[in-house]
Image (cartoon, helix red, strand yellow):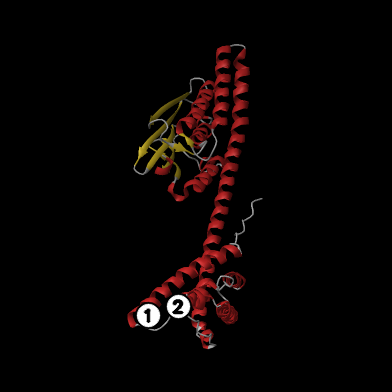
Amino acid sequence: MTTEPRMVEPSPWRIALVAFAFGTFAAGLYMTNALMAVWAYSVPHPRIEIVTRLLLLFWSWTPLAPLVWIAARRWPVVTPHVVRRLLIHLGVALCIWLLHAAIYWTLLNLRAWLDIAPLMLGVRWPPPKITQLVVLIDTDLVIYAVIVATASIWRNHARAVASRTWRDRVDSRRSTALLEALRRQLRPHFVLNALNMALSELANRPKRAKAVLTDLAALLESTERLDGHLVDLEGELDIVRAHAAIEQARFSDRLEVRWDIVLPPGTVQVPPFAVQTLFENAVRHGLERSGGPFTIFVEAHAVPGGVRIRVRDSGGSIARSDSRGAGIALDNLRTRLGLLFGDAARLSLRVMDGWTVAELNLPAKAA
């Protein structure tokens, strides 16, 4: 059973490191403006005071950013609780502001207590004032809102990526399961027919029996080589050719198979057993119900935007009770096409000019 993966939240240390980096960048912007104002208006204010005050102001957000991230995760701003959640975040933001003010006040007093600047630079720090903490509230509320918004955007993106990855994994496993179902369905069907035919021909026509067994071995070998969600068209046609040889031996001279492949080898990829499914459908629902000569055309041509593959048979009719249009194999193939290409691939079955035509159109990315 495939369960949807959980999102991996960033660690508090990583959030703190990002906050430190952005805090340094923001402090640099504020420093530039402040120092330019000091220089332009000759304000008697020590530059070292501007630099250290701004760095302490923004760096002190480093331990607070993980707390805001946790609050954003605990109370996401989503409907139908938007107003309630905003009020909760307003209360948390005020608490964060008080905590930031306490940290900032402590750092300012610690800076004065260390008394480094008077010894090294010949300046004295101005004494901290309580008003410096009050004016922090607008900046802190903006920073809090930015972190909450960033956490919400990141979480929505991570959830979308996780969901898409999970769906891709489920689709891949489903496509693989459908392919394995086709492979299991193919083996007993052909093995049984081929072995019965070889046994019946062994006494009177040993060469034909040997040819049937050789074709059966080629069929099984080609089947084992088909792996993955897309395979080369040539590998797919190897199965169809072996299948056709067995059916021609089975129905003697009643079956004629013609090939019209106008594509360079190795340039087209198709879902495994795609063409074989169409060919088997023509045999099972056309040839086996026909009492006279029967012809099957296998065609592959490039068309604008992709490739068109047709399997035409001379049956020339699709009865309402006929399962050709709703058979398990065709439904299986349609499902795999939808998983691989969405609406870009089409599979149709119709009567045209006296021929029953199974047509497979694949997009350019499969070509």
User: 309 or 28, which is in the foreground?
Assistant: 28
Q: Which amino acid type is shown beneath numbered disc 2?
A: Ile
Identify residue for label 2: 50
Measured in 3D between alpha carbons, the distance from the residue under mark 1 to the one under mark 2, in whole angstroms, is: 10 Å
Q: Residues within 10 Å of mark 2 (few under 14, many from 20)?
A: some
Disc 1 crowd, CA 10 A, few/some/many (<14, 14-19, 20+):
some
Residue 295 x %, y %: 44, 28
Is 6 rendered above or below residue 34?
above
Evaluate whether residue 157 shows in this view: yes
The residue under the point 56% across, 49% down is 171
- For the question of whether residue 321 can be seen, the reply is no
Kind of residue indicated by mark 1: Val
Q: Position of residue 270 (x, y in %)?
A: 47, 38
Residue at 60 percent across and 42 percent down: it is 177
| Left or right of 62 in this view: 295 | left
Vertical relation: 302 (above or below) 295: below
Report the front residue among 364 and 128.
128
Question: What residue is disc 1 on?
Answer: 38
- Secondary structure beneath disc 2? helix
- Front-lying residue, 258 or 170: 170
CB contact under 8 Å: marks 1 and 2:
yes
Q: Quadrant of the C terminus?
A: top left
